[in-house]
Image (cartoon, coloured by chain):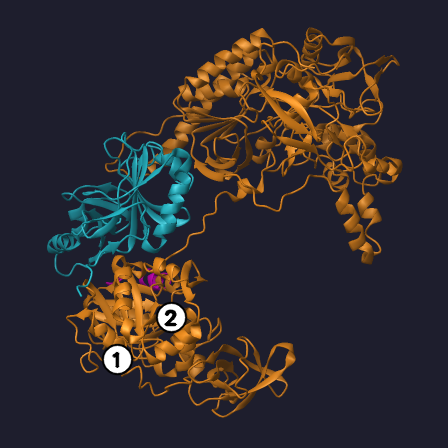
Chain colours: A cyan, B orange
Amino acid sequence: MARPAAVARSPIPAFGSTDVVAGWEVSQTSRTSQGATLELIDCMPLTKVLVRGAASGAVADLLKTPFGRASRTLSGVLTTACRPEEWTLYAVPGSAPRLIDKVTKRVPAGELVTLLDITHGRTLVRLTGSRGPDVLCKLCGIDLSDAVTPTGAALRTSVARLTVELVRDDRNGVCSYLMSCDRSYGDYFFGALLDAGTEFAIEPQGFVLPGI
Amino acid sequence: MRLSLRPGEVIDRSRPLRFTWNGHDYPAFLGDTISSALAASGERVMSRSFKYSRPRGVLTADSLDPGCIVQVGDEPNVRASHRRVEDGMIASPQNVWPSLRFDVKVANRAVSRFLSAGFYYKTFMKPQRLWPAYEAVLKRFASGGVISNRPAAGYFDKRYAHPDVVVAGGGPAGMSAAVAAAEAGAQVMLVESEHELGGHLRWGGAHELSVLAELKAAVSATNSIEVLIDSVVAGRYDGNFLAILQRSLPGVTERLIKARAKTLIVAPGLIERPYVFAGNDLPGVMLSGAARRLINLWAVKPGTRAVVFTANSSGDAAAQDLEGAGVEVCCVEDARRGGDVVRASGSATLQSVECGDGRTYQCDLLVTATGWTAPTSLLNMAGDKPTYDERAARFFPCSLPEDVLATGGITGDGSLEQILEHAAHTGRLAAGRARVAGGRLRKGVPHAAPTDSPVAEEQSNAITALPVDAHVALFRGRTHGFVDFSEDVSSKELEAAVAEGYSSIELAKRYTTATMGSAQGKLEVVNAVAVVAAATESTITETGTTVWRPPYAPITLGALAGRTLEPVRYSPMQSWHEARGATPLVAGAWIRPDHYGNPTAEVRNVRSNVGLIDVTPLGKFDLRGPDAAKLLSQLYVNKWAKLAVGSVRYGVMCAEDGVVLDDGVTGRLSDDNYLMTATSSGADTLLEWAESWLQTEHPEWRVHITPVTSDFASINVAGPKSRTLLERLVENVDLSAEAFPYMRVRRGRVAGVEDCLMWRIGFTGELSFELHVPSSYGLHVWESLMEQGADLGIAPFGIEAQRILRLEKGHLIVGQDTDGLTRAYSAELDWAIKLDKEDFSGKPELSWQAERSDWPKLVGLRPEDVTVVPPEASQIVHDGAIAGRITSSRMSPTLGRPICLGLVAPHLAEPGTELSIVLPAGVRARAVVTEHLAHFDPEGQRLRG
């Protein structure tokens, strides 16, 4: 009997019918015809690579993303720096080996750099919509105004009493936040965001390629 | 009686409503409060007072109204002069029995002379043994409504905010300040406690209404003003951290906003002060503001024949409004010309008023306008100590911090235009200060490129102060009356308190409970101070005021609690466990399967077939770098330098005092890469511990430690058939005992999933393999194992079965078989401690312990009675003294008898020693110290199989 193909699953329970995208079981999108004004997307399939290295080292030169910021200095990759001497790279599903190889090749021998594929260890969601700050301000004490947390801001903070890496990453001029937390909290975290967004008609959405 | 259309009325006559009060049906209009609707129907008595059961009615017609506190449905203590009527609402009086018309507690009036201040303290303290009886009776007299045992159904919420300027008070000054601040570039939050903006303009004349319309339009046109109505700034804390309670939101019952305002403008206006005289609490006696609100907001005629006692323009305006509403004003007693009121009389409601010169008027309405109280609470919370102005007969702000400003009536008088101008200046100043504060804040925010924008300079502080009008000092007349309507405290009782020695206002307050009722002093404090000042023959300034503390207004427990945010952690296999009816075990934040119905059967299955346990919560850390072994050697008591690639080793970690901190297994995956595990509960501590050593003691070490607990789904496959099972699913790895012996690690493909780690270790004493697979495939691998193991008798097992299995095998659990004093030698870990290492955490203490022999020891214990399982934590006694305790205890399904571990005194640790265990109810059970900690397979043949 043929063994079923391994399918990766998100910690966020599927809502509605499911599909398999890039080897991941994802909820099918249910956008209204006009498009949801506030949506929460399970972005679990995106590749996540943790990079640790010296702030003055080759890896910092390569990633060109100072602490507290996010940028797209590598092609197709969102680089965030929520902690000193630590970066997280977000890219399309299945690209971790390529990314790790790419960075490894640019690091001189002898420089201490840790590169870890943390795709499966972190829950990743994207909250998009002009009411996004209204949802987050129910769960997070950070000043989310444009002046203090503009697009490109990256920080590690408490959201819904969890340690969360929060990145303001606007999409087509619309306010958008990419948030990641420990995978095991994924179900709780997604539920807390949906609960907070209920009064703003938030809609959960499934992952769609490329997703970054 | 309802009046004809009023220009500023807030009721919608096209939206009639019905509601129930006191068991009877009443009409209302949308926009009516409970008390306005009742007043419109001619009801004057809305409650009974707390102590003397005196009838009470509308006094202030706003949220402070002490005589209008009612029960609505299952919600007690609702402010009937603030809460709007909803269709079908059921309201009832509270604290009355059998009815509002006749309350049995009226009898208290007959003994009122004995119920003065301090009555409880003097009467019920002795004899002490009777207190339970007193308490049972007194509880029936407690004020307040009936609390439902059911959880509140509404959505209670919290929110953070970071406005530039918060304006507390949405009257004309607050609105003007908000608009000016917003026009100066500030993000403004305008907070108003009433249902609409406008303050006293709402019940004013044509000019006031015109100005109100302009202000409202200006607020609406300014996008950067967030208006919160039916909301209150309940507290101001350091750094302008404000607690704001917000109500009247669609879908949200109450929301507590935690605002970090750069600047706070306090613009609460003034609160009208009652006058103290005999009968001042009778229904029909009300403040001028109440009469004007009833007439102009709700089109209610508050009486038919009125006396107006006035000392200011508000009283004058009330007299005009009354006449305009068709009320016969039989007397305007003007305090500015020496007039006074000394007595109001009536049985249940007002029937006559006696003036100071002896004139008496038959009437059903007495309106008083005798002065103002400045609600300085928020200023007090900001450190201000308001000062009393004798000329104006009220308190004023004195010294405010930079981030707090005040405007409006609280700061002075003047024309409406002067107040608006003052407020606008204040708003602009607040915006300027907020800009400066914001500039400082933004300097600390990381940007892609350095910003050279200078911090904005603060604007000029110069604001022309408002004029202060003279006002007759009216507090108490020639007769005694109520000072605190909520607590039924009279001026006579305050004087009695002073006579008993409570001459400080703070002491008199606590002794009499004056100012401690529902209005929290906003109506009563100045009168109380004045009465105490007079009784002590001192001035109001000398007497001072009580301290105003948060909250400014009552907050429900629901608002304080907010939403339930209790983070929980699940493994990737949680859905499978739930579907199989696993009993959950809460282990820290983790939810784990305790068992699947029969832990005993689960144990037997592991011993005879194969079982699966989800051990995902096991702490896991990736160590990388050439100095990783140094870190391990520092953290653990045993050696790591020679651990070969592909091998794993058990390690014990001690704190600097030699106490066992954690344990776990670490595998060497490559030259510079290790995977370290820790107990589920100790993972966070371990990371902090390791980082502490790296960052403070050995920053020169080149190693990174990264938590990867959730990166892997961890599954322990245990039992004699575990190898057979895995051979069906594992590719690229030789699972034979020779190629993959005990305490080794391999990387391979499991059920088609790449990069799975397999460890030949286990906690059960059986042949077992611990799989660490990428979490997203955890459920796939688990389901594959269950499917492939069906013919092998596979079954899942939970934490309880694992605990039994490990106890049979004699494996200790850190934190259960050890405690906060258990050093490593006490835990029978001698074999692991390598004192010949250069250094490790706890080495000095353990070296000292090794030289002594007076420490307790962990031993295996075999109870003699095979039917008795001593409870964990049972005392072990010897020669009449406590000699230890049971740390772990279970009935062993494998051995058919109870098995235990225990910490005992060293002289009792020899195998064969008989010990006595104290069971519940004092019964003793005997147990014998065993040769090994392991009760089953002490040689370890099964796990090495």
Residue at 52% across, 14% down: B420
Decide if residue A175 is on the left or right side of residue A113.
Answer: right
Highlighted range, magenta = B688-704
Decide if residue B489 is on the left or right side of residue A94.
Answer: right
- Mark 2: few/some/many CA within 10 Å (<14, 14-19, 20+): many
Estimate the x, y position of residue B3 in percent, counting from the top left.
66, 11
SS of the residue under disc 1: loop
The answer to which of B830 and B367 lies nearer the viewer is: B367
Estimate the x, y position of residue B542 in percent, counting from the top left.
73, 31
Q: Quadrant of residue B923 in the image?
A: bottom right
Point out the frontmost of discs 2 and 1: 2
Mark 1 lies on residue: B742
Residue B834 appears anywhere in the view: no
Question: Measured along the vertical axis of the image, is residue A144 above or below residue B583?
Answer: above
Residue B575 appears anywhere in the view: yes
Q: Quadrant of residue B359 in the image?
A: top right
- Mark 1: few/some/many CA within 10 Å (<14, 14-19, 20+): many
SS of the residue under disc 2: loop
- Inspect the magenta stretch and tell me whether residue B699 lies in it: yes
Give how far apart the Cα atoms at labels 2 and 1 are.
Answer: 22 Å
- Inspect the magenta stretch and tell me whether residue B34 lies in it: no
Mark 2 lies on residue: B797
The answer to which of B735 and B529 lies nearer the viewer is: B735
Could you tell me which chain the residue with mark 2 belongs to?
B
Q: Quadrant of residue B58 in the image?
A: top right
Estimate the x, y position of residue B884 in percent, counting from the top left.
54, 81
Which residue type carries mark 1? Tyr
Total marks placed = 2
Estimate the x, y position of residue A176 in percent, counting from the top left.
29, 37
The answer to which of B731 and B626 lies nearer the viewer is: B731
Which residue type carries mark 2? Phe
Q: Are marks 2 and 1 on the same chain?
A: yes
